[in-house]
């Protein structure tokens, strides 16, 4: 790697100066909003929606900073990327606070939390998770394939898939997928995204299990995502898709049971 001259570093710092100022302004705003929430919990869901938007904007500043570093200095700005990754975790956590982090459960288990979002239409819900998903994708791409954070992103992707499902207006989904409904388009796109993300999260946890950790908990979590996906298909009346997912679920469950017995056998031999 070529040495970075003082002049190149100076030019880079000048170039990113406005982005650093924006970062500081957003961090100050976040701190203020959290203080307001602590003092006045009324309307906390909408205040946290604002926080989520701010965190997504903040993450974009970190991503741009790293892109500029790559362009001008030919190196990634790892500090900026790490800050961006942590910021996206915060965005997901803020959304979990609103809609819950429950995965494979009946809608009734978290429906009460969504009552406060009744005034938030389907388009805004979809736009929020779409923007969050894009930010996660951009930060992963900025890190590259050989990053040490490769497997940690599996958890972030999984938690994102879960809140994307939980913010969805499942109560009115059937009426909203009527082509005559004004909510038709965002509802259909949001539903497609949920199905895609749940399957992707399942596959990623299985991949993490097979290629990295060999931890049973990772495999179980992948199976939980399959079960959550099947639940969505059933609720939406997608019988063929539900059956397809069930077959995959059964195959994975059998594999999990076999692996558990195999591990128990190995442990018994050591004792």
Image (cartoon, rainbow, N blue to C red):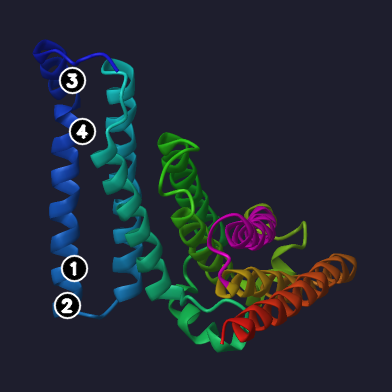
Q: Which residue is mark 4?
A: 19
Residue 246 found in image quarter: bottom right
Residue 195 magenta-drawn? yes
- How many neighbours does mark 1 have within 10 angstroms: few (below 14), some (14-19), or many (20 or more)? some
Residue 38 circle label: 2
SS at mark 2 in the image = helix
Which image quarter: residue 147?
Answer: top left
Q: CA distance from mark 3 to mark 4?
A: 11 Å
Going 67% across and 52% down the picture, which residue do you hit?
185
**How far apart are labels 2 and 4 at the CA level?**
29 Å
Q: Residue 269 location, x and y as percent? A: 63, 83
Q: Which residue is mark 3?
A: 12
Question: Could you tell me which quadrant the C terminus lies in?
Answer: bottom right
Find numbered disc 4 in the image and state the secondary structure of the residue it sits on: helix
Q: Position of residue 85 (x, y in %)?
A: 35, 50
The span from disc 2 to disc 1 (Cα, nearest Å) is: 6 Å
Q: Nearer the viewer, residue 44 or 259?
A: 259
Quarter of the image for residue 188 reads bottom right
């Amino acid at each position: 790697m070529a040495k970075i001259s003082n002049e190149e570093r100076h030019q880079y710092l000048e170039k990113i100066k406005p982005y650093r100022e924006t970062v500081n302004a957003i961090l100050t705003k976040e701190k203020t909003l959290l203080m307001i929430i602590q003092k006045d919990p009324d309307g906390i869901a909408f205040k946290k929606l604002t926080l989520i938007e701010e965190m997504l904007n903040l993450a974009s500043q970190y991503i741009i900073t790293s892109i500029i570093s790559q362009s001008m200095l030919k190196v990634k700005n790892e500090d900026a990327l790490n800050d961006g990754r942590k910021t996206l975790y915060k965005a997901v956590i803020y959304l979990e606070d609103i809609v819950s982090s429950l995965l494979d459960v009946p809608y009734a288990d978290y429906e009460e939390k969504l009552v406060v979002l009744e005034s938030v239409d389907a388009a805004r819900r979809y736009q929020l998770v779409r923007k969050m998903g894009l930010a996660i994708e951009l930060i992963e791409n900025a890190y590259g394939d050989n990053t040490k954070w490769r497997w940690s992103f599996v958890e972030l992707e999984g938690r994102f898939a879960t809140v994307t499902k939980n913010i969805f207006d499942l109560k009115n989904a059937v009426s909203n997928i009527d082509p005559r409904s004004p909510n038709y388009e965002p509802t259909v796109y949001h539903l497609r995204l949920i199905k895609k993300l749940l399957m992707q999260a399942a596959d990623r946890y299985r991949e993490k299990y097979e290629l990295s950790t060999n931890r049973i908990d990772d495999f179980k979590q992948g199976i939980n995502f399959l079960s959550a996906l099947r639940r969505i298909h059933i609720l939406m009346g997608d019988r063929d898709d539900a059956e397809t997912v069930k077959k995959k679920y059964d195959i994975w469950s059998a594999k999990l049971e076999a692996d558990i017995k195999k591990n128990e056998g190995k442990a018994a031999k050591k004792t």
